[in-house]
Amino acid sequence: MTAAPTVALLGLGTMGAAMARNIAAAGLPLRVWNRTTDKAEPLADVATVAPSAAAAVDGADLVVTMLFDGDSVAETIEAARAALRPGTIWVQTTTVGVDAAERLGRLAADLGVSYVDAPVLGTKKPAEDGELVVLASGPESVRDAVTPVFDAIGGRTVWVGEAGAGSRLKLAANAWVFTIVEGVAESLALARDLGLDPRLFLEVVRDGALDAPYVQLKGTAMLDDELAPAFGLANALKDVELILAAAEGAGVDLALMPGIRAHFARAVDAGYGDLDLAATYREH
């Protein structure tokens, strides 16, 4: 592989588009593809916009997938099967859960490509700033090859073991994210319905042991109703389902996630799925 590997990035939503710009800014030759071409065309100034997934991966050294779920990833890679060459490294960054990560690993083996399971921590702003945390898992033999991409999209890469370990750690991390968001929403709603200004909650925890940047960020977004999606609510609900499925498979009794699922689902059913996950507050 050359010092500047050719990268194909499949999936140009909020995260994928930001990752693509940072990969291109790092000087890596880049092809991009998205199912809806209107999301790909704005990247024509920094990348080659491919008409199909197969065209994007043809001749690429690294293939990066950032799509919605395991099924969409599998469908896209299958569509590109004929163009994948031996020695290609597939870097799978979508949050897909335990079962799908294993299924995609088997698909990679069938395709004859190296598989790196590497979901990322962070939302729109960290993605735009190239400050994601990459939870990488896969064969040690390809670590040097994928480092240019991980350095471009992330501020930190944590190698956590064999392929699939990254997806398992991502679920644990997202469980904490959702616990914070729903906990803040409930505390704000309780303060409000007890006749208080809910902003007092954010004020009393500010800069103390009970505070965190995410508490203030999401709490302020809830109260100001500023819900442009950094992490879409429908996507968050999908991830909650993955967390619960993983917990069931592992025999872990999670007390909080079923309630969080119910609240997220209620907000999605109310039509807020395309908004930020902070929109859960609207249904409290």
Image (spheres, rainbow, N blue to C red):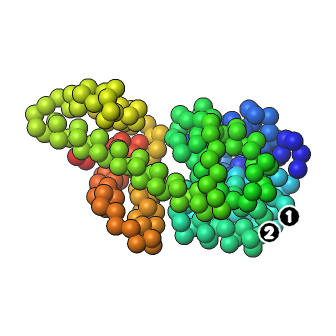
Upstream in sequence: badge 1 or badge 2: 1
User: Which of the labelled discs sits on residue 86, or is there none?
Assistant: 1
Q: How dense is the environment of label 1, judged by Cα within 10 Å: few (below 14), some, or many (20 and up)?
A: few
Q: Are marks 1 and 2 in contact (CB under 8 Å)?
A: yes
207 or 179, which lies in front?
Answer: 207
Above/below status of 252 relative to 18: below
173 sits to left or right of 51: left
Residue kind at label 1, given as amino acid type: Pro
Tell me where residue 129 appears, x and y as whole percent.
60, 31
Q: Nearer the viewer, residue 144 or 67?
A: 144
Provide residue 273's location: percent of width, then percent of height: 40, 50
Which residue shows up at 65% across the image and 62% down it? 163
Residue 208, visible in the rendered structure: yes
- Left or right: residue 277 compared with residue 154: left
* Rendered residue at 68%/72% (across/down): 106
Q: Quadrant location of residue 59?
A: bottom right
Q: Is residue 201 above or below residue 48?
A: above
Q: Position of residue 49 (x, y in %)?
A: 75, 45
What residue appears at the point 28 percent right and 30 percent down from the top-left corner? 205
The dot on residue 265 is none
Which residue bears the numbered disc 2?
112
**Residue drawn 64% across the image and 51% down it:** 159
